[in-house]
Structures are given as C-alpha cells and as structure tokens.
Amino acid sequence: MPERQHPPAYLITFTCYGTRLHGSEFGSVDRGRSVPPNEGLEQFERRLMTQPAYCLDDNRATIALSAMQETAKFRNWVMLAAHVGSTHVHLVITADDDPERVMGDMKSYASRALTRAGCEDSNRKRWTRRGSAEYLWDAGDVARAIEYVMNQPGKALAKYRAGGFPQKSAGG
C-alpha cells in the first residue's frame, strides 16, 4: 500500500472550550458543514458544558504559543505562522503527519505548559474537542493562509511568522 501523501502545509484552527458553541450568533462548523445560528441549539450546548468557558489572556497565549513552537520543533514540523487570540488558535504548519495528530499534540503540549506555569490545574478544559484543518496544496494557498493568520481581525495575544515568507504590503 502506498504511503499517504500529505500536503505541503495545513491551516489548522481550534477554539477555546465553550467559546464557540454550535448555534451561536457567530456561526460554527461541525464536521465540515456550516451550522447556522440557532438559539435553542446554543442553549442546549451550554447546558452540556461541565466547566465555564475558557479564554486566554496575554500570559496564557504566550505560554501556549511557546509550547506549540517547541512541539513543532520536537516533531520536526515547521510552523510558518500562528495567531493566538483569546478564544482561538490559527496555525499554518508543515508536517508529515495527519492534521488531527498535529492539532492534538499542539493542544496537549500547550495544556501541559499552562498547567506547569500554574495557570490552572490539569483538569481544566481548555480546548474544544475538534477543530478544522484546511489542506494547503500549493505555494499560493500557503501564502494566502499565512496572510489570513497574520491579519486576523481582533487582537492577537501572541503571534508568530517564520522568516522567508514575504509579507504583502497594506496596499495589496
């Protein structure tokens, strides 16, 4: 059986626990399908939560990003860009692994680092169970994903961009 081919990079997105419930006014995605706003669904999901929603602050975002950078280095992945906001994480990363493994490792190592730093105990739910991964098959897709991650609306609490990838000027 031939070895499974991985794309040159992934755009991986995951959210903090309880911050993007299905049915919320912001919309959400479930298994690749868009979930429109639905107040009843959002209230149902909120009742299922076993802990309060989790948000990152500047310190936690910095710790999480640092742990993700260390994880990428340890796994021989290359992080091209990262945006850590208060409620979500976007990563553009190259890896010879499936995106689910990349996402799982990033969440696990960031959580451990946050626990070691004394932010919360190890039982704190920090991340949603799933996330999304877009396969980036060509250089243009990778460049667009990097721009998307670096120019997210709202404040980035922690941000990273690998060298060697030209930034688009504000004028286009």
Image: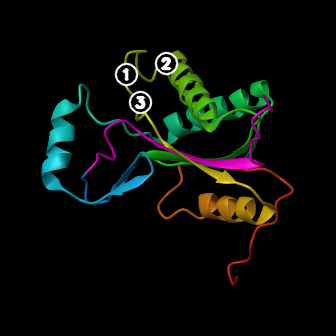
Q: Position of residue 102 (x, y in %)?
A: 63, 33
Is residue 105 found inside the magenta-colored segment of the image?
no
Q: Residue visible at 58% across and 33% down?
A: 100
Check if mark 3's residue and mark 2's residue have beta carbons within 8 Å.
no
Task: Nearest to the eye among marks 1 and 2: give it.
Answer: 1
Q: Amino acid at mark 2?
A: Thr
Can you identify the residue that label 1 sits on?
Answer: 124
Specify the label residue 126 is tagged with.
3
Check if mark 1's residue and mark 2's residue have beta carbons within 8 Å.
yes
Q: State the CA–CA distance, disc 3 to disc 2.
A: 11 Å
Q: Residue visible at 45% across and 24% down?
A: 119
Q: State the CA–CA distance, disc 1 to disc 2.
A: 9 Å
Q: Nearer the viewer, residue 103 or 153?
A: 103
| Image quarter in which the C terminus is found | bottom right
Q: How many marks?
A: 3
Q: For numbered disc 1, what is the local secondary structure? A: loop
Q: Residue visible at 81% across and 30% down?
A: 76
Check if mark 1's residue and mark 3's residue have beta carbons within 8 Å.
yes
Q: Position of residue 41 (x, y in %)?
A: 18, 47
Is residue 8 found inside the magenta-colored segment of the image?
yes
Residue found at the very far right of the displayed protein = 164
Can you identify the residue that label 2 sits on?
Answer: 115
Find the magenta span and give its range.
Answer: 1-22
Q: State the CA–CA distance, disc 1 to disc 3.
A: 6 Å
What is the crowding at mark 3: few (fewer than 14 residues within 10 Å), some, or many (at least 20)?
A: many
Q: Residue visible at 41% across and 30% down?
A: 126
